[in-house]
């Protein structure tokens, strides 16, 4: 029997102009997604692009939420 990983889902509140929100809904509807799903895809794509350029983001450390970016292009 497979055990599935359960990830904690957090809530994030953002401030967004009405026009931008309306446009987000148009794009999400076109893609057949909810606005929330569309935002998650945009965030995922942004993180993937960042990691391609700067290296993997490793989370951890003593402080919660501390992250370390391993920059492939950093000569330190």
Image (cartoon, rainbow, N blue to C red):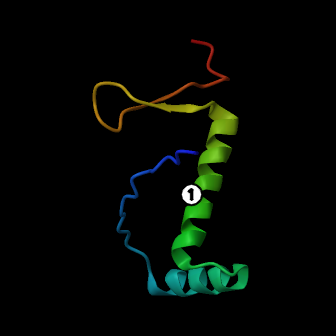
Q: Quadrant of residue 55?
A: top right
Q: Residue at x 67, y 23 (%)?
A: 73
Q: Residue furthest left?
A: 63
Name the image quarter holding the C terminus. Answer: top right
**56 is higher (above) or lower (below) than 11:** above
Q: Residue at x 51, y 73 (%)?
A: 36
The residue indicated by pointer 1 is 43
Query: Is 16 displayed left or right of 37 in the figure?
Result: left
Number of numbered markers: 1
Q: Residue furthest top?
A: 76
**39 is higher (above) or lower (below) than 4:** below
Q: Residue at x 69, y 81 (%)?
A: 32
- Badge 1: how crowded within 10 Å, few (<14), some, or many (20+)? few
Query: Is 28 displayed left or right of 6 in the figure?
Result: right
Query: Helix or strand or loop: what does disc 1 sit on?
Result: helix
Query: Is 66 displayed left or right of 43 in the figure?
Result: left
Q: In x, y percent, where is residue 7?
A: 44, 50
72 vs 5, nearest the viewer: 5
47 vs 73, nearest the viewer: 47
Q: Residue at x 51, y 82 (%)?
A: 21
Name the image quarter holding the N terminus. Answer: top right
Q: Quadrant of residue 15?
A: bottom left
**18 is higher (above) or lower (below) than 10:** below
């Amino acid at each position: 029997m497979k055990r599935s990983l359960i990830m904690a889902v957090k809530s994030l509140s953002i401030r967004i102009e009405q026009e931008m929100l309306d446009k987000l809904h148009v794009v999400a509807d076109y893609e057949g997604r909810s606005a929330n799903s569309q935002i998650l895809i945009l965030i995922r794509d942004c993180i993937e692009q960042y990691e391609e350029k700067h290296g993997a983001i490793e989370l951890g450390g003593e402080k919660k939420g501390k992250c370390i970016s391993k920059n492939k292009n950093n000569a330190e």
